[in-house]
Image: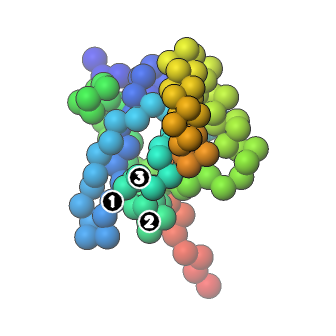
Amino acid sequence: MATTLKTARYLNLATFRRNGDAVNTPVWFAERNGAYYVFSAGEAGKVKRLRNSSRARIAPCDMRGKLLGEWAEAHAVVVKDAAEMDAAYRALRDKYGWQMGLLDFFSRLGGKIDQRAVIRIRAGRAPGPKRR
């Protein structure tokens, strides 16, 4: 039986290179207000790829990226709003508890916590340009 994103612990986030090749990455995620949120190092490849294109795919997976369900088209953006970032971190802490706390502790200790990026993912294709 396929796992859904409602019950999955990990999400496989596929972002796309300029040449169209997908790069799959298993990540922690949390749902809030109809969107999925993940965090990453601010200069990670997925963040750089999303700055070029919001096109993405998502699927439930295990910690190694093995798919546990079907891919769904999505669009993803790097969040700039501080309040939305705080809400995303709260949702992630609620879901992952002590594990997220431990990761935050070591990120603070290493001076990397302020260099993170938060990504908002919504299922469905990215909105296209407006037509006249």
- Asked where in the image residue 47 lies, by quadrant, the reply is bottom left
SS type, badge 1: strand
Q: Amino acid at mark 3?
A: Ala
Residue drawn at point x = 27 percent, y = 66 percent: 20
Residue at which label 1 appears: 16
In the rendered image, is residue 37 in sight? no
Identify the residue shown where x is 28% and y is 17%: 1
Kind of residue indicated by mark 2: Ser
Residue at left offset 43%, top offset 61%: 48
Give whichever of 83, 107 is nearer the camera.
107
Mark 2–mark 1 CB contact (< 8 Å): yes
Note whether 47 is above or below 67 in the view shown. Answer: below
The earlier-in-sequence mark between 3 and 1 is: 1
Label 2 Cα crowd, 10 Å radius (few <14 / some 14-19 / many 20+)? some
Q: Position of residue 51 (x, y in %)?
A: 48, 64
Mark 3–mark 2 distance (CA, rounded to whole Å)? 15 Å
Badge 3: how crowded within 10 Å, few (<14), some, or many (20+)?
few
* Viewport quadrant of the C terminus: bottom right
- Extreme-bottom residue of the structure: 132
On residue 53, which mark appears? 2
* Disc 1 packing (10 Å; few <14; some 14–19; many ≥20): many
Amino acid type of disc 1? Phe
**How far from the left and from the top, in percent, is residue 42?**
50, 52
Q: Which quadrant of the structure image shows residue 69?
A: top left
Q: Earlier in the sequence, mark 3 or mark 2?
A: 3
The residue wearing badge 3 is 44
Task: Please tell me whether mark 3 or mark 1 is closer to you in this view.
Answer: 3
User: Percent position (x, y) of residue 83?
Assistant: 76, 44
Marks 2/1: CA distance?
7 Å
Looking at marks 2 and 1 on the same chain, the residue that comes earlier in the sequence is marked by 1
